[in-house]
Amino acid sequence: MEDIIIKLKEDLKKALDYLHKEYAGLQIGRASTGLVEMIDVEAYGATQPLKNMANISVPDPATIQVQPWDKSVMGNVEKAIRDSDLGLNPVNNGNALLITVPPLTEERRKDLVKIVHKEAEEAKVAVRQARHNAINKLKNMEKEKELSEDELKAKEKEVQEAVDEINKKIDEDAKHKDNEVMSV
């Protein structure tokens, strides 16, 4: 029975962590390593995230510097960044790629707010699915007489409290990201 609650809390944390990762990847007009680190790069006959093959830093608020550990993959890294849907254009100086993050237009900010809300809703869908799975497992335990009706109600309440807490956090994070995107 406790395993069900533990698994639920792990699933809820995964949903929130995924949301944070998605938010980190949003271009909000400031340079951030999270913007490019998960771009997939084809190198050595395999595809891997950029963060696994390069040092990524932010030398100033408008620039991202990508320095591949192996200079022979510089062209592949440059192509992957250029081909990503981020609209970034890296400049190769021979040692590293410099990426200037352009300031956001009002229209782009509004699009990003929609993405923020879409990502928050996807996280809530994952939370609802985790809740649904936990409740079903508890109800099956009650059917199998492993759990009394009172215990079921108490555990359902515990599940709902955990879900409410994580949904509140998702809403707060979405509101915070919304404000961050819209502030000039």
Image: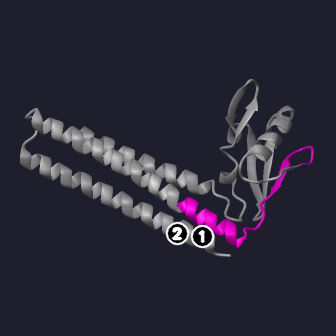
**Residue 151 visible in the displayed image:** yes
Badge 1: few (under 14), some or many (20 or more) residues near its Cα, within 10 Å?
Answer: some
Query: Residue visible at 69% across and 72% down?
Result: 106
The residue under label 2 is which amino acid type? His
Q: In this view, does 108 lie above or below 49?
A: below
Residues at marks 2 and 1, CA–CA distance in whole angstroms: 6 Å
Position in image of residue 81 (x %, y %)? 77, 45
Assess whether residue 39 is covered by the magenta stretch. Answer: no
Pointer 2 with pointer 1, Cβ within 8 A = yes
Which segment did they paint magenta? Answer: 92-116
Disc 2, SS: helix
Q: Which residue lies at the image location 74% right of the left edge and 32% below the top edge?
A: 42
Say which amino acid is labelled 1.
Glu
Badge 1 marks a residue whose secondary structure is: helix
- Queried whether the magenta region covers residue 114, the answer comes back as yes
Furthest toward the right, the residue is 94
Q: Looking at the picture, tell me which residue is in the foreground, 69 or 176.
A: 176
Left or right of 9, for residue 56: right
- If the image is split into quadrants, where does the C terminus sit? bottom right
Tag of residue 180: 1
Asked if one can make out residue 2 in the rendered structure from this viewpoint, the answer is no
In the rendered image, residue 123, in percent from the top left (x then y), is placed at 44, 52
Q: Which colour scheme is used?
A: one colour
Dot label at residue 176: 2
Query: Looking at the picture, how far across and down is residue 80, in whole percent?
Result: 77, 41
> Which quarter of the figure is the N terminus placed in?
top left
